[in-house]
Amino acid sequence: IGLNKKDYPLDEWPHEEQEKYGRGTVRTTEKFYKTFGIHVKEQRIEHHLCRFVGRPMMKEFLPALREDRMGLDYDKITYEFKDPMPDNKPKVPKRKPGPDWG
C-alpha cells in the first residue's frame, strides 16, 4: 500500500488477509493518505486525528455520501487533515522496526 520503506523486505509482514480485505477501489491510497494526514515519503503522520473523528468528520464528509449511501464519493472530498495542535505532539517511544512489533 505504499507505506513500507524501499529497503524493508515485504516478506517480513503477514499477507494472509491481504486479498480478503485489500485496500478497496473507491479511492486511491494516495487520496486516502492525503485526506487523513499520512505522509508516506516522510514516513510521518499528522497527530490528533482522533479529535477530528466523530461530529467534525461527519460534518465535513456527509456532503460526499454516495447516493446509494454505501460510503463516500472521494472525488467530492477535498479535505486534508492537518494537526490542529502542531505544538502539542504526543510522546511516542522510539522502537526499532522488526518482527517483534505487535
Image (tube, rainbow, N blue to C red):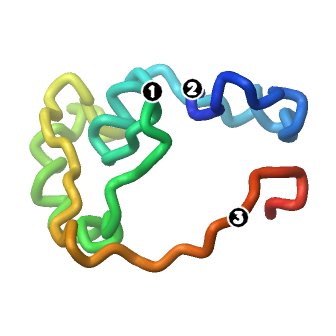
Provide the residue designation for mark 1: 29
Give the crowd class for mark 3: few <14, some 14-19, many >=20 residues within 10 Å. few
Q: Residue at x 73, y 25 (%)?
A: 7
- Quarter of the image for the N terminus: give it: top right
Residue 82 visible to an observer of this rendering: yes
x, y percentage for residue 75?
20, 23
Residue 16 visible to an observer of this rendering: no
Of the image marks 2 and 3, the number of the one nearer the N terminus: 2
Of the image marks 1 and 2, the number of the one nearer the N terminus: 2
Q: Are marks 1 and 2 in contact (CB under 8 Å)?
A: yes
Q: Nearer the viewer, residue 92 or 34?
A: 92
Provide the residue designation for mark 2: 2
Q: Amino acid at mark 2?
A: Gly
Provide the residue designation for mark 3: 95
Q: Nearer the viewer, residue 33 or 87?
A: 87
**Circle 3 or circle 1, nearest the eye:** 3
Position of residue 54 relative to residue 6, above or below, is below
Q: CA distance from mark 3 to mark 1?
A: 26 Å
Q: Amino acid at mark 3?
A: Arg
Which circle marks residue 57 in the picture? none
x, y percentage for residue 13?
84, 40
Q: Which secondary structure lies at badge 2?
A: loop
Q: Are marks 2 and 3 in contact (CB under 8 Å)?
A: no
